[in-house]
Image: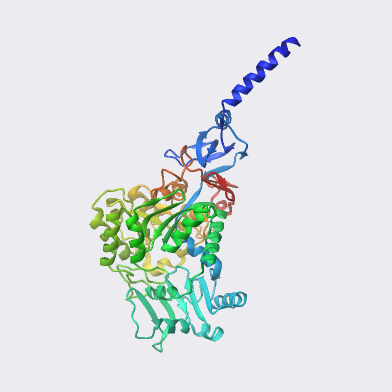
Amino acid sequence: MKTLKTLLPIFLIVMTISCSKKQQADLIVYNALVYTVDENFSTAEAFAVKDGKFVAVGSTDDILAQYSSDSLIDMKGGPVYPGFIDGHSHFYSLGEKIARYADLVGCRSFDEVLERLQKHSEQYPSDWLLGRGWDQNLWDDKSFPDNAKIEELFPGKYVCLTRIDGHAGLVSNSVLSLLGFDKTTKIPGGLIALGSDGKPTGILLDNAYDMAKAIIPQLNHSEKCNAMLAAQKACFEAGLSGVADAGTSIENIELMDSLQTAGVLKIKISAFLNDDQATLDYFLPKGVIAKERLSVRTIKLYADGALGSRGANLIEPYSDDPGNRGLMINSLEYLDSICQRAYAAGYQVATHAIGDMGVRNVLTVYSNLLKGKNDLRWRIEHSQVVDSGDMALYGKYSVIPAIQSTHATSDMPWAADRLGKDRVRFAYAQQMLLQQNGWLVNGTDFPIESISPIYTFYAAVARKDLDGNPAQGFQMENALTREQALRSITIWAAKGYFEENNKGSIEVGKEADFVALDNDIMTISEKEIPLTKVLWLFVSGEKVY
């Protein structure tokens, strides 16, 4: 008994000294399967977070021996990944869609479009009736609609209905009148569809529809704030800690910055600049902007239109529309002039190009400045159809493909009709594109596709839709491995806008962005992947979902 009384104080002193040697952390996650997505794609069991950054990554025993915290999460063997990053999205557009647009995604007929519009109009009465997401390729009659029924149901209203790709729309006669469009109007880089009577049908493509979108009344400041916060909520629910907003305005970027400074907009955004003169004149002299939650260093350009609306610029005519090769939205001279400004300012360029001629034109413009191998990371957004002879140019000039795996699974039912059986083999050739530089960027293009990075992962590896079709997968030679797919929505997405040293993996010194799922997408059966749910998400060490 005397021995115990003697030893007890010594034991307490030793324990106190031992505990005092532990470093204090803000958070410890342990008993986890941590996919670090580091260079070796190693796994760990635990990590500690302090001041918004990872300070240690390792085994559960080591982390708990070295660190203490008032906040601990026992994952009980569950999976943890770096926070997902959408490499190409339209963040503000998502918020605006949530705030004011009728959701037309998935409509199986034009009549269903009209039904949804009537409900939306009754619930949100306004002089302007806006909708987004219709896709005539899902209908029995796959031709573009006209606005005759719109005029019957909504006489005198200003109606703008954006097709799912954002490159075409159906407008009412009131909008046509506001624009001054008639059968004689010609729009460079755009198209005003005419009916058999020679009058505009209401269908506008590319630059013509951009003019219609430009006259839609803007949201006020308060509404814009709410739209951005709504977009953030949707992103966090999906497990996204960061996004690239692929083309936005001065006003939107400054609003993002102010909301982030105020601490209410916590998502990390790489804002790509619109290519208008005012925006470039404002930002380029400032140089690259790199803050913890906001970076500005990229200019977004457009080469051609979209495949679904037959606006993508093709080398040979559309197989289902002989004589039509699509169109270039901007001339090569214009693209070259902006690229020269970007090069001189140290800015990255990200150019939308979907058709093989559009891609070729962009590669031609890029090559004049890039010359050969480089680390400027100029990108071609979408890269959906690439001529076999042009594929190696991505590697020759270090051009990064920024792809969307869900575009492949959305377009596959009709892509062969547009392109023919030979040309379609080089459509959505994502593994082939990856091999050119050893990496690529993946995203969703939301709100055009579902916001879910889990669906992106599934589409990349399975090349199937959410119903599991086609059974053998679509052109599986271009599927990504699970490791490649995870890298494409984490570290490679961050690398796509020069942020790989700060985020995209779970490594000491990086920002503590991480997500937990209810199942391990790296090991579960293929069919279980799209059923996987987000449990929680941390951004810079703060739990946001």
Q: Is residue 472 visible?
A: no
Check the image and report above or below for 17 versus 464.
Answer: above
Check the image and report above or below for 423 versus 50.
Answer: below
Position in image of residue 80 (x %, y %): 55, 43
Rendering colour mode? rainbow
Q: How many marks?
A: 0
Q: 397 and 247: which one is in front? A: 247
Horizontal side of 23 relative to 335 (left or right) equals right
Q: Quadrant of the N terminus?
A: top right
Check the image and report above or below for 78 versus 497.
Answer: above
Residue at (40%, 58%) from the top-left corner? 272
Q: Is residue 278 visible?
A: yes
Position in image of residue 293 (x %, y %): 47, 50
Outermost top residue:
2
Location of residue 420 (image quadrant) = bottom left
Horizontal side of 26 relative to 196 (left or right) equals right
Position in image of residue 361 (x %, y %): 28, 63
Residue at (35%, 55%) from the top-left corner? 286
Position in image of residue 340 (x %, y %): 26, 59
Q: 334 and 423: which one is in front? A: 334
Q: 59 and 477: which one is in front? A: 59
Outermost right residue:
1
Check the image and report above or below for 56 versus 181.
Answer: above
